[in-house]
Every structure is written in structure tokens, then in C-alpha cells.
Amino acid sequence: MTDGEAPPAGRDELDAAVRELERTAARLRTEEIEPEEAAELVERCAELAGRVGAALDREADARSAAAGDPGQERLL
């Protein structure tokens, strides 16, 4: 992103998800956590990571389309 360029759409959502991942990871590192809570937190991290990955893919696709970069093909 260059000076004067608006942040990509969804950046706030990504930032919020990253902050939640960081908080959840910190909770998982504590010693006073029950196994059930740990399992729930791990599932939550996986869900958040999937959402973040999908959002980043969408952002990359949008940037590529906006740049008119026909040489970039999407791998399946």
C-alpha cells in the first residue's frame, strides 16, 4: 500500500481476527486451562485462521484483477 492509497476493504476485519488469534494463543499458553477449554480455543483458532486466509485470498485476487495482471493464474 502506498501513501494516499486507501486500506483494502476488509482490513479492519482482518486486524480484528489477528488480535483475537493473538489473545487466544496467549490463553492457550497459560497453565491454568482445562482440556475442554483448550480444545475449544484450538477450534476457534482454526476457524479464525481459515477466515483470515480466505480474506487474504480475496484481497490478493482483487488486487491482481485491479492491476490487470493476466499472467497470474489461480492454482486449484
Image (spheres, helix red, strand yellow):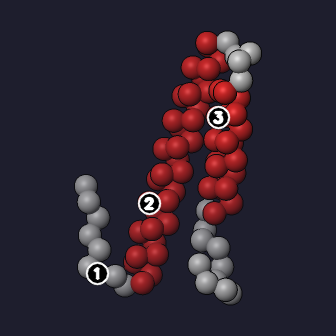
Question: In the rendering, at what x and y percent does residue 56 appear?
Answer: 49, 59
Q: For this view, does 41 lie left or right of residue 46?
A: right
From the image, state whether disc 2 or disc 3 is nearer to you: 3
Question: In the rendering, at what x and y percent does residue 65 appear?
Answer: 40, 78
Residue under circle 2? Answer: 57
Quadrant placement of the C terminus: bottom left
Badge 1 amino acid: Pro
Which residue sits at x=26%, y=60%? 75
Mark 1 surroundings: few (<14), some (14-19) or many (≥20) residues within 10 A: few
Asked if marks 2 and 1 touch (Cβ < 8 Å), the reply is no
Q: For this view, does 68 lie left or right of residue 31?
A: left
**Is 54 placed above or below 70 here?**
above
Badge 3 amino acid: Ala
Question: In the rendering, at what x and y percent does residue 12 appear?
Answer: 68, 60
Q: Earlier in the sequence, mark 2 or mark 1?
A: 2
Mark 3 surroundings: few (<14), some (14-19) or many (≥20) residues within 10 A: some
Residue under circle 1? Answer: 70
Asked if marks 3 and 1 touch (Cβ < 8 Å), the reply is no
Residue under circle 3? Answer: 25
Foreground residue among 66 and 42: 42
Q: CA distance from mark 2 to mark 3?
A: 23 Å
Q: CA distance from mark 2 to mark 1?
A: 17 Å
Q: Secondary structure at mark 3?
A: helix
